[in-house]
Amino acid sequence: MAGPNLELFKFGIYVFFPVAIMLHYGNPDWYIENILPYREKFWPSPSNTAARIPHNSTELQNELDRLKLRKMQERQRALAPSSASDSS
């Protein structure tokens, strides 16, 4: 066995490493330099997107109804050719 010095060293690494990572990546200057310039490339602004996020319960319910209706229509369209070939 290596002894208490090794255990003390391992404990120091286990505690220091996450704290150092949080200090480095949590720095506001680092965020401004490295994240903000590229954010628009990955996540477009809401004004540039076609989808609109529902903000209240009625909008959410309307969107869910629209999605259910579209899914039902797609299912009926997929089943229609197979049922037509079965009857012939």
Image: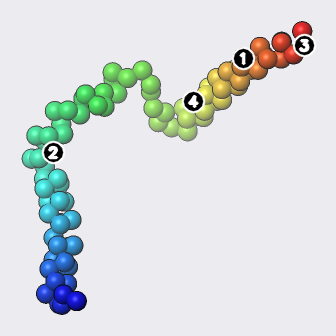
Relative to the observer, which residue lies in front, 51 or 80? 80
Find the residue positioned furthest to the top.
Answer: 88
Look at 83% across and 17% down and name the residue there: 83
Residue 58, image x, y percentages: 57, 34
Look at 49% across and 33% down and name the residue there: 54
Categorize mark 3 by other alpha carbons within 10 Å: few (<14), some (14-19), many (20+): few
Q: Amino acid at mark 4?
A: Glu
> How far apart are the alpha carbons under marks 2 and 1?
49 Å
Q: Which residue is mark 1?
A: 77
Q: Amino acid at mark 1?
A: Arg
Q: Quadrant of residue 88?
A: top right
The mark that comes first in sequence, 2 or 1, is 2
Q: Secondary structure at mark 1?
A: helix
> How far apart are the alpha carbons under marks 3 and 2?
64 Å
The mark that comes first in sequence, 4 or 3, is 4
Position of the N terminus, as image quadrant, is bottom left
Categorize mark 4 by other alpha carbons within 10 Å: few (<14), some (14-19), many (20+): some
Q: Quadrant of residue 14?
A: bottom left
Q: Amino acid at mark 2?
A: Tyr
Q: Secondary structure at mark 3?
A: helix
Q: Are marks 2 and 4 in contact (CB under 8 Å)?
A: no
Q: Which mark is residue 66?
A: none
Question: Taking 35 as reference, is 43 left or right?
Answer: right
Q: Which residue is mark 2?
A: 31
Q: Which residue is mark 4?
A: 63
Relative to the observer, which residue lies in front, 35 or 64? 35
